[in-house]
Image (tube, helix red, strand yellow):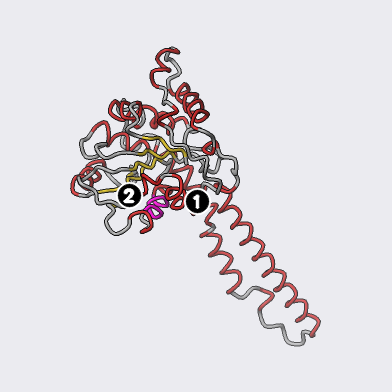
């Protein structure tokens, strides 16, 4: 399948950007600060002859305004956290055999015209899905480093080792939009994961970057992990030789995170199709998963 540089990325970035705008409250923060710092009508000097009663009323209104501003900030903080904290019972917490059934059901949506036999051939075996049921904490980015250290010790070890060849990560982290890619990249650059010898963390998404730019970067850079949208990762795997799977041991799917419409990575048709057709469904990756060389992790 040949996809344009944008693919599903642009659509999903748009969805996530709306969420980030609403969740971060940056524009609203500025507005609130302006309200707090700039004089309002109540703050203007009282007209000559105004009584102390008027001044007291003005002060009371000012206090009420500040209280409202505090409430707004508290609400925005809750909105910022909702996308991850609102889902304590993520599908990702289930056992490998249950996750295999879930992934198979998602694959059936992508390959809706395939026969039962053809779908069975694309099924990801539960032996190739990492068992992370021992992790009982939240599956949020604040806990991603600990999640890897405690549930994926082999991956942790590999991330801290020196990469041998350019463009050959040991981890592919697949998420739905550019802003999320940037957030995950910052976490994976944690020294607790990379140590002193670990490779770079590649940031791969279509927005702002041409495919040729990513190819050039990967061919000259030894990366330990690559974080990207499925559209860009898929194109790099299928259409170039810049991103290789020679050292790849884990593919992590960002399942627990939900966008503003409460959809996860595989709920969105465009990103789901790219995940199963161009990333997990690529010939080399698919074979490596079935043989057990690559483990699929649902985070």
Q: Residue at x 61, y 54 (%)?
A: 78
Measuring from the top left, give residue 200's x and y in whole percent: 28, 52
Crowd tier of the residue under label 2, counting other residues whose Cα lies within 10 Å: few below 14, some 14–19, many 20 or above: many
Horizontally, is 227 left or right of 88 in the view?
A: left
x%, y% of residue 175? 42, 41
Q: Which residues are magenta?
A: 182-188
Locate the N terminus and report the quarter of the image it occupies: top left
* Relative horizontal placement of residue 191, taking residue 164 as reference (left or right): right
Q: Is residue 247 left or right of residue 257?
A: left
| Residue wearing tag 2 | 159
Label 1 and label 2: CA atoms lie apart by 29 Å
Does 280 sit above or below residue 143?
Answer: above
Q: Residue at x 45, y 45 (%)?
A: 151
Quadrant in the picture for residue 169: top left
Camera-side residue: 67 or 164? 164
In this view, 114 is above or below 195: above
Q: Residue at x 37, y 49 (%)?
A: 156
The dominant secondary structure in magenta is: helix
Q: Residues within 10 Å of mark 1 (few under 14, many from 20)?
A: some
> Residue 34: where, in percent of width, then height?
56, 69
- Percent position of residue 247, x then y: 26, 40
Secondary structure beneath label 2: helix
Sequence-first tag of 1 and 2: 1
Which numbered dot is residue 104?
none
Q: Which mark is residue 20?
A: 1
Residue name at image x 24 percent, y 51 percent: 162
Helix, strand or loop status at disc 1: helix
Q: Is residue 154 left or right of residue 70?
A: left
Seen from the viewer's position, the closer of residues 264 and 1 is 264
Give the foreground label among 1 and 2.
2
């Amino acid at each position: 399948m040949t996809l344009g540089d944008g693919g599903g990325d642009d659509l999903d970035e748009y969805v996530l950007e709306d969420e980030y705008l609403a969740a971060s409250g940056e524009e609203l923060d500025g507005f609130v600060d302006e309200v707090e710092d700039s004089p309002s009508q109540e703050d203007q000097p009282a007209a000559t002859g105004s009584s102390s009663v008027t001044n007291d009323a003005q002060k009371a209104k000012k206090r009420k305004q500040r209280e409202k501003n505090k409430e707004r900030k508290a609400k925005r903080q809750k909105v910022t956290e909702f996308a991850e904290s609102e889902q304590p019972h993520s599908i990702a917490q289930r056992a490998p055999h249950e996750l295999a059934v879930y992934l198979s059901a998602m694959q059936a949506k992508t390959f809706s015209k395939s026969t039962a036999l053809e779908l069975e051939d694309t099924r990801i075996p539960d032996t190739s899905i990492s068992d992370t049921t021992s992790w009982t904490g939240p599956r949020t980015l604040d806990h991603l480093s600990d999640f890897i250290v405690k549930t994926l010790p082999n991956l942790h070890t590999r991330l801290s080792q020196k990469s041998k060849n350019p463009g050959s990560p040991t981890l592919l982290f697949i998420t739905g939009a550019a802003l999320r890619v940037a957030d995950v990249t910052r976490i994976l650059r944690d020294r607790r994961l990379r140590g002193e010898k670990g490779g770079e963390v590649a940031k791969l998404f279509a927005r702002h970057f041409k495919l040729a730019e990513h190819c050039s970067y990967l061919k000259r850079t030894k990366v330990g992990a690559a974080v990207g949208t499925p559209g860009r990762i898929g194109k790099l795997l299928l259409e170039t030789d810049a991103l290789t799977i020679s050292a790849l041991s884990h593919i992590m799917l960002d399942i627990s995170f939900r966008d503003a419409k409460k959809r996860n990575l595989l709920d969105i048709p465009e990103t789901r199709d790219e995940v199963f057709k161009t990333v997990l469904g690529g010939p080399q990756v698919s074979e490596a998963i079935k043989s057990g060389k690559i483990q699929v992790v649902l985070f």
